[in-house]
Image: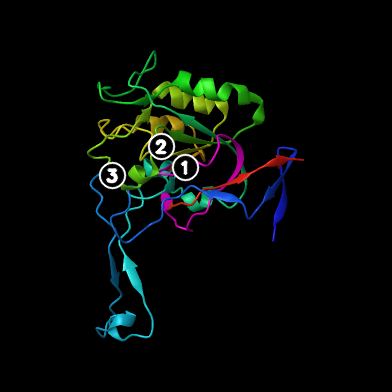
Amino acid sequence: MKKIAEITLEEKKYKIDLNKFYDLSIPITMDSKSPSFYDKKPLKIKYYKDRNGKVWNLNEGSSCNVPVIDLNIHCGSTHSECRSHITKENIYISEILDNSFISCLLISLMPKNNIGNDTYHHNVDSNDFIINQLALKNKLDKFKNSNIKALVVRTLPNDIDQIILKNYDNEPNSFFSNEAIKYLLSFGIEHLIVDTPSIDKLNDGGNLGNHKIFWNLNKKGNKNTITELAIIKNEINDGLYLLCFNILNLRLDASPSRPILYKINEI
């Protein structure tokens, strides 16, 4: 049965089928089938042991399972984060993201082994692959009047099987130039979704310069978000969508995230 919804954003009306969507999240699994960043170990599960020594596991005779997990939000699964990831502010991702629909553009880019005329706040090596400002402008300029608030960036080549198992400590991630991030801000992007573990270089001296630019630390109240380690399957075409985030109600800087894209038809 079709579930058709009519959505109004910025005085434009859209029609979407709620049964037809694209999930951009990597499943959180209890095995090694997930990316690794900063030496993240596979997620392990144990079962709750109460004060009487009882282990709440059906295999050990209890009436139900009560699993306990030690989850590294940032380094092994799709997650959304806000500026308190790099500040001491009491800002929580659950206060910024809700289940509202957001106008979104999906683009695909091949990171280049050349920063061009752009700059980066740390050394750029010969084996680094960068998304620069010109690459973004070539994709986004024709959408200047579309009032897009979210951008999904799929890096090419897009080998899904390799991405899920990728160890970024051994194979460095592609990242954005400083000018590329500044361009996204000037374009009006508030939510950036990428299929890499960071918009910065893995080892940038601990600066996290692109994060600082995107969250504009000189301006209080910035509610921009960054979603990393998304997975964008090849069957999803580049173009305009409506985006909806699904996150946990955590009073933290970040949460496991399930970004959902819906095809749109303008009414």
Whole-angstrom CA distance, mark 1 to mark 2, is 8 Å
Foreground pick, 119 / 92: 119
Q: In which quarter of the image is residue 53?
A: bottom left
Q: Is mark 1 in CB contact (under 8 Å) with mark 2?
A: yes
Residue 234 percent location from the top left of the image: 48, 40
Name the residue rendered at 33%, 33% in the picture: 208
Percent across and percent down for residue 229 are 39, 44
Asked if one can make out residue 58 in the rendered structure from this viewpoint, the answer is: yes
| Relative image position of residue 240 (x, y in whole percent) | 61, 36
Give the residue type that dot 2 points to: Asn
Q: Mark 1 points at which residue?
A: 232
Task: Bin the neighbour count of mark 2 within 10 Å (Cα to Cα): few under 14, some 14-19, many 20 and up.
Answer: some
Seen at 26% across and 86% down, the residue is 52
Residue 75 on image: x %, y %: 32, 47
Choose top left, top right, bottom left or bottom right for residue 121: top left
Please name the predominant secondary structure of the magenta segment in the image. Answer: loop
Instruction: Please provide the residue range marked out in magenta.
Output: 228-255
Secondary element at tag 3 = loop
For residue 182, which numbered disc appears in the image?
A: none
The amino acid type found where label 3 is placed reads Phe
In front: 105, or 215?
Answer: 105
* Residue name at image x 27 percent, y 63 percent: 44
Q: Which residue is disc 2 drawn over?
A: 158
- Which of disc 3 and disc 2 is earlier in sequence? 3
Marks 3 and 1, the one that precedes in the sequence: 3
Residue receiving disc 3: 37
Q: In this view, does 22 lie to the left or right of 58?
A: right
Q: Quadrant of the N terminus?
A: bottom right
Magenta-drawn stretch contains 231 = yes
